[in-house]
Amino acid sequence: MSIDSKFQGAVTRQRRANYSGWGQRIGAKPVLKNLILISGFFSINAAGPPGNILFFLGLLYLGSRGAEGTVKALSLLYLALTANKALVSTANIFFTIGKFGILFASVAWLFISISRQKKSFMHLPMINALAAFCIAAFCLAILADRFILISAFKLISFSVGALCIFLAIEALRDRRHNLDIWFLSIAIFIALAGMASYALGIGFNAKTDDPFSDGLFNGSFYHPQTLGPAAALILLWLLGFCLLSSYNRKWIAFVLIPVLLGFAYLSSSRTSLAAVGMAAIFVTLTAAVSSNQIRKQIGRGAALLFLPTCLLMSAVVAIEFVQPGRLSAGVVQFIMKRGQGDGQALRVEQISSSRQPLIDMMLANISERPWVGIGFGTSTRPGFGSGDSIFESTTTEKGILPIAVVEETGIIGATFFAAFLFSVFRYLLRKKNLIGFAGVAALLGINMGEMNFFAFGGQGGLFWIWVLALVILGASAHRKGRNNRFQVTRPDEFS
């Protein structure tokens, strides 16, 4: 074999290593295929109980096709579970049981995927910390002696769901995949379905007795409090995708950003946008500690964002000049949940009025049971626990996550929860996964206004899926930067 042939072979192997399932020159065809697949699952599911059965059979088949297929199945499950009720049929026993069946099956599939890679998940500190928190929370629920069965099932749901996320991170850590293109396709689907719901008049159909949510835009989801956080997390993912990905059609992500911003505004998701905004600032400020390759990509992405940002700011100035007060009035309406309050001045009591009664109730429970709490996933509000079933227990409207954790699990449980969060952040920092770190931080920020961190039986699972997408995106970027440091041997060094 000639020296040139050896060199060309080395270059080919290097290119394959650099791809690692990420950064290829992928066209629009995979995105179109993904959109057809997602639409197909939604169409089947909308057919009622028979469609639900076919829907879950399809998820079982998709999930069994490796770790990438498992993540796709989980994302489709939570996308359908939280979708606008005009688009899906989920209010039946088949869907109620099936969603937990997919969660347990996903754990098994991911265990198999990791074992086939001859890796062990036991070195992941998050799993040990997760187990410690869940065991402690269950023991504390027994001591609290209130709705123990509800606490048990909610802990099982959270532990299995979080285990799926962490196992997927490990299973995909060194594997080729096209999940970044998959999540881009989901973002496109959510944007298109949201715009269609607005045009068809089904984008404001959330059934809610909350005066602060009545009349707000829910778009492709069943509630504005789902659309807002989801749009915010997707915006953070799109920002990371624009800055870190080598995909040759990034203009798609740029087009989606203003659409999702509009959705977040129409849903009046104040906490979500604030949390993701802070996370985006964190990514920008900490980019300097990343590898040189990632810094270059961030620089190129920032250069691409510069012109649209300037145009947007110019438009804002022009509108405010032509019609003074129009934008500022819109900001006031957004902060006031689009018209709540007197609309004249921003007062703290107006902004927090949708949360204050819940906060007062939680603080009273903490003062009564400071060490063991009232029981994980439970509440002292009148009527809690009535009409529950094994698979569908009463929701717990809480609001602020730290206060809720102390209320439900006491100071003891909150200590275990803090250790769990520390292990997650420590893992991501050790892996230099800044966008993944920002994703978890954004999820916690969102839970300063809506407590869905533990809700794997509902919208919380959707938000965790997007955190997984952010972690995968960050891991792919880091792996690509590491592979690019490989130096191909020069031809004259072959012998």
Image (spheres, rainbow, N blue to C red):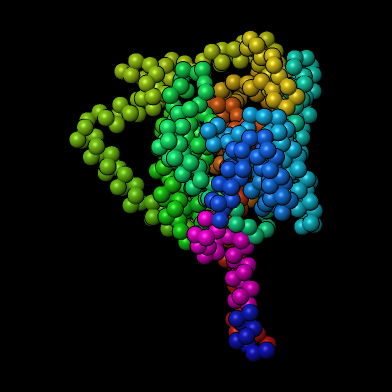
Q: How many marks?
A: 0
Tell me where residue 177 sits by quadrant: bottom right
* Residue 193: percent from left, percent from top: 48, 41
Q: Residue at x 60, y 29 (%)?
A: 452
The residues colored magenta run 10-32
Snapshot quadrant of residue 396? top right
Left or right: residue 478 compared with residue 302: right
Residue lying furthest left in this view?
Answer: 322
Dominant SS of magenta comes to helix
Residue 29 is one of the magenta-drawn residues: yes
In the image, is residue 416 part of the stretch drawn in magenta? no
Residue at 75% x, 31% y is: 156
At 65% from the left and 60% from the top, the residue drawn is 176
Judge whether 440 appears above or below 123 on screen: above
Q: Is residue 367 visible?
A: no
Q: Nearer the viewer, residue 187 or 379?
A: 187
Question: Horizontal placement of 110 versus 478: left or right?
Answer: right
Q: Is residue 291 above or below residue 425?
A: below
Instruction: Tell whether 156 sits left or right of 363.
Output: right
Quarter of the image where the C terminus is located: bottom right
Q: Residue furthest bottom?
A: 2
> In the image, what residue occupies the spot 59% across and 66% down?
18
Task: Give the image location of residue 388, x and y in percent.
Answer: 71, 19
x, y percentage for residue 71?
66, 47
Q: Is residue 349 above or below residue 197?
A: above
Seen in the picture, residue 410 relative to 6 is either above or below; the reply is: above
* Spot occupied by residue 319 in the image (x, y as percentages of width and height): 24, 37
Closest to the observer, 494 or 77: 77
